[in-house]
Amino acid sequence: MTQEAYVSQGPLTTEAGAPVADNQNSETAGVGGPVLVQDQLLLEKLAHFNRERIPERVVHARGAGAYGTFTVTADVTKYTRAKFLSEIGKETEVFLRFSTVAGNLGAADAVRDPRGWAMKFYTEEGNYDLVGNNTPVFFIRDAIKFPDFIHTQKRDPYTGSQEADNVFDFWGLSPESTHQVTWLFGDRGIPASYRHMDGFGSHTFQWNNEDGEVFWVKYHFKTDQGIKNLTAEEAEILAGKDPDSHQRDLREAIERGEFPTWTAYVQIMPAADAATYRFNPFDLTKVWPHADYPLIEYGKLELNRNPENIFAEVEQSIFSPAHFVPGIGPSPDKMLQGRLFGYGDAHRYRVGINADQLPVNRPKATEARSHGRDGFLYDGRHGGAKNYEPNSFGGPFQTNRPLWQPFTDFTGATGNHPTPVHAEDNDFVQAGNLYRLMTEDEKERLVKNLANAISGVTRDDIAERAINNFRQADADFGKRLEVAVQALRG
Ligand code: HEM
């Protein structure tokens, strides 16, 4: 319903629909007397107001969303049997929520932080969610470290602020973060808007075709608006002047009919390559260089419709890396495996057990036919149908065909095993390669940004350990950083 449609609706009512006589003066015992409990309108309004908030997302609380279309532009049927990717020209409705990671609801948009890229494809085989970032890698490679990592990015329990000590202590002690931190403090660390950045699935996922063949894939969405970033100085000013800069930019561009688009690419690795590839293909701190696995163009994404109600459609939207469709599945990436649990659990806590059935979240090109019933805010959609399976009353039935193919390559005892290391894997190699790819200007800005941040650390040992990771990535990088931090710390 648009704002215009809502205003033409006749008398104001209570939540139960009874007409309201007076919405300006509460009811009192005589003129100037105390307020009466029988003023049910007053009590209802105050009680409803107290319950307007739901728990904010524990990460990625701050975000903006838009609807659009994904169109297939190349034949990928020899790699996946996913129906929404089955024909050139096929269109699927999508909803995409962009976000920052660390800030609470209401935080400024123009900050140095990865941007979330959470995408829901409303396919005819169920909703497929791709919950990625604007970065191809991440800070850590095992989900067991995620709560600790995020604690260092959010507010300190004592000071109530984000603390450089915590941020760089964790990164210094987690050298696998060096690649992502180098990326984050480089030019792309503060996008000029959500429209001017790329999106990545980041993890490796499984595609499987009609014959059951398996491929490992990485998703890339390249902005057709061109990459545009803010310098640290520009961002500082914008964040203060217009905390909603990115949200506003997206909404206004769509209102103007300037629909942002991205070209979709996929890197495809035949399953047989995985065991001997030079980098562990399931390590989220690593990219697959394009020289090894080129980008294959297969689609176009366009965002063309704003949500009408931010709370209903953006705040209550839910995305889960566990929402797969036939032909697409997870990989053994330990981060992804942890995320398969984390999101559904967050949704049940934050939005409730029927979150999947809210308009923004429910399938649009098919329907959910589960026997999950009842619970808070159940809408009765199953009517009187039987609520168990198998049944003899024509109820929905299992297909006997898993969405993805089994993993086959694992042997040995259970245990808290580190992610296996392949021939060229170490924590620094790709961070060093990224640094050496930068122009002189880019290197200067990277060193300046990092030095400014590290100079906020209060303990020398924490600052030195953080710098040492960059030294190991590239000697020149480390040296410049050390000099710059010394100059700032005195
Ligand atoms: C094991 C590691 C991780 C865990 C346990 C985790 C957990 C979470 C949780 C609990 C939320 C809030 C969900 C909600 O309340 O609806 C969230 C949001 C999000 N996460 Fe993660 N996360 C992890 C790693 C990642 C990574 C590696 C990426 C990207 C590659 C990512 C991208 C996102 C995005 C985009 C959102 C916002 C979704 C939205 O717009 O609703 N997360 N994460």
Image (tube, helix red, strand yellow):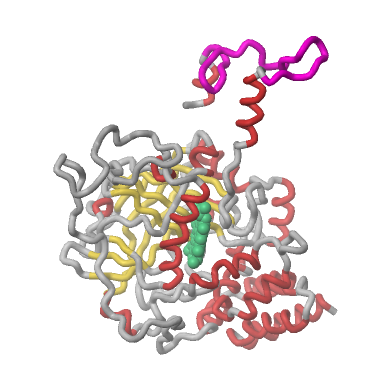
The reply to whether the magenta stretch includes residue 166 is: no
Q: Is 462 on the left or on the right of 13, as rendered?
A: right
Q: Is 428 on the left or on the right of 327, as rendered?
A: right
Picture coordinates of residue 440 (x, y %)? 63, 76
Residue 382 lies in what quarter of the image? top left
Picture coordinates of residue 111 (x, y %)? 66, 57
Residue 357 in view here: yes
Tell me the quarter of the image containing the C terminus.
bottom right
In this orientation, which residue lies closer to the viewer: 68 or 203?
203
* Residue at left offset 54%, top offset 39%: 311
Picture coordinates of residue 188 (x, y %)? 58, 64
In this orientation, which residue lies closer to the viewer: 6 or 238?
6
Residue 304 lies in what quarter of the image? top left
What secondary structure predominates along the stretch shown in magenta? loop
Picture coordinates of residue 181 (x, y %)? 60, 72
Q: Is 110 on the left or on the right of 121, as rendered?
A: right
* Residue at left offset 69%, top offset 56%: 235
Looking at the image, is 68 positioned above or below residue 113? above
Residue 226 in view here: no
* Residue at left offset 64%, top offset 82%: 477
The reply to whether the magenta stretch includes residue 24 is: yes
Where does the magenta region start and end? 10-37
